[in-house]
Image: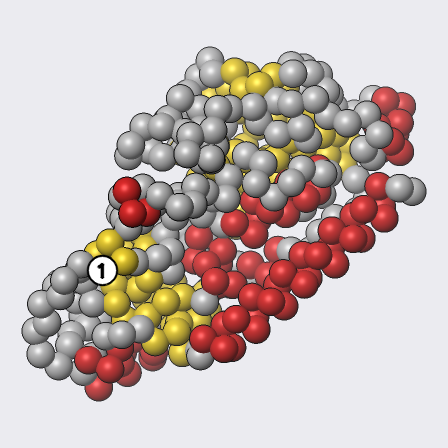
Amino acid sequence: MSIRVESFGLLTTIQDLGRRGFQHLGVGPGGAMDEASHRMANLLVGNPDPAPSLEMTLTGPNLQFETESMIALCGADLSPTIADQPVPLWRPVMVGAGSLLKFGRPAQGARCYLAVAGGFQVPKVMGSASTHLSAGFGGFQGRSLKVGDRLETGPCSTDRYPTLRKRFHQSQRPFLGSDWFAPWFRELEFIQPAHIRLIPGPQWPLLTGESRHSLLGTAFKVAPNSDRMGIRMQGPSLSLEQPLEMVSSGVARGTLQLPPDGSLILLMADRQTTGGYPRLGEVASVDLPKAAQLRPGETLRFSLISIEEAQELLLRREARLRDLEEILADQQTR
């Protein structure tokens, strides 16, 4: 079972939930920028959470399906079509052999995730299939996809969505979407400015009063040079009460740094493992998917949250995911 790349889009890579346990060697976790959308896409086709998916940024590729496949698209709406017909997001979709999946303009969000039943078959490096672009390993030959690449997929269980398969085989359409869908887009919101909750970090008290006011009272714009390493922001210049020389220390996805030029950087999936800039805070895990879906020129606002509140929000999100998994399992048996 395979999928051929006819065009590659802006940046299309294979990602999973990342590689853990190697930061002491200078290798960060990486993985999907929007973990929630990645997980939801896999859930909709019956894959486990860590199964690799395609992460497509702003403009997607054209993909030729050489065999019948069940897929799910979650996250950004990059205007997917098959035979000029819109393909629905947030639900299982049966795609016929020979179908060409195309993506158009980015209607909403920045990153879309494509999961295929059976998963993409790529070698694991350090326990993960995620593409590490700067180091050139993982994923598909350690790089983004290009024309002519052929992605191999695993076997799809014949008893998954039997009713959907039957309807598909009776239909003359090039694809058929399930009636069941996951309304997870409501979690992402896709509103401007995005509301990002911040747990104060060790250097938060060292900000000037004016800078604290500006950080919490200003909408920051996503800079064009933002990438998988970090979201760079344009806005008022922030400063500390006095210059600070720091020894490099560990950083995490969601660390909000303040470089000497006063412009904020929010570290994301391909961040470095250590950093020497002041750490103003950590973005609550539940808000990282919203940050990952921001496009250059879009805006975000920060508000403060306690670590206890952030943990409660994360527990609630995981409970909702478990509920959806149970609902989907029930749908599969009907």
Given residues 65 and 154, the one toward you in this image is 154
Given residues 156 and 4, the one toward you in this image is 156
| Image quadrant where one finds the N terminus | top right
**Residue 308 % position (x, y):** 50, 77
Residue placed under numbered mark 1 in the picture = 249
Residue drawn 57% across and 19% down?
A: 152
Whether residue 276 appears in this view of the structure is yes
Given residues 39 and 293, the one toward you in this image is 39
Crowding at mark 1 (Cα within 10 Å: few <14, some 14-19, many 20+): few
Is residue 192 shown left or right of residue 120? left
**Residue 279 % position (x, y):** 25, 67
Residue drawn 52% across and 49% down?
A: 35
Residue drawn 56% across and 70% down?
A: 313
Whether residue 266 appears in this view of the structure is no
Q: Is residue 187 above or below residue 126?
A: below
Q: Secondary structure at mark 1?
A: strand
Residue drawn 67% across and 19% down?
A: 99
Residue type at tag 1: Ser
Is residue 254 shown left or right of residue 65? left
Is residue 109 shown left or right of residue 97? left
**Residue 151 % position (x, y):** 54, 20
Is residue 300 shown left or right of residue 56? left
The image shows a total of numbered marks equal to 1
**Residue 306 % position (x, y):** 44, 79
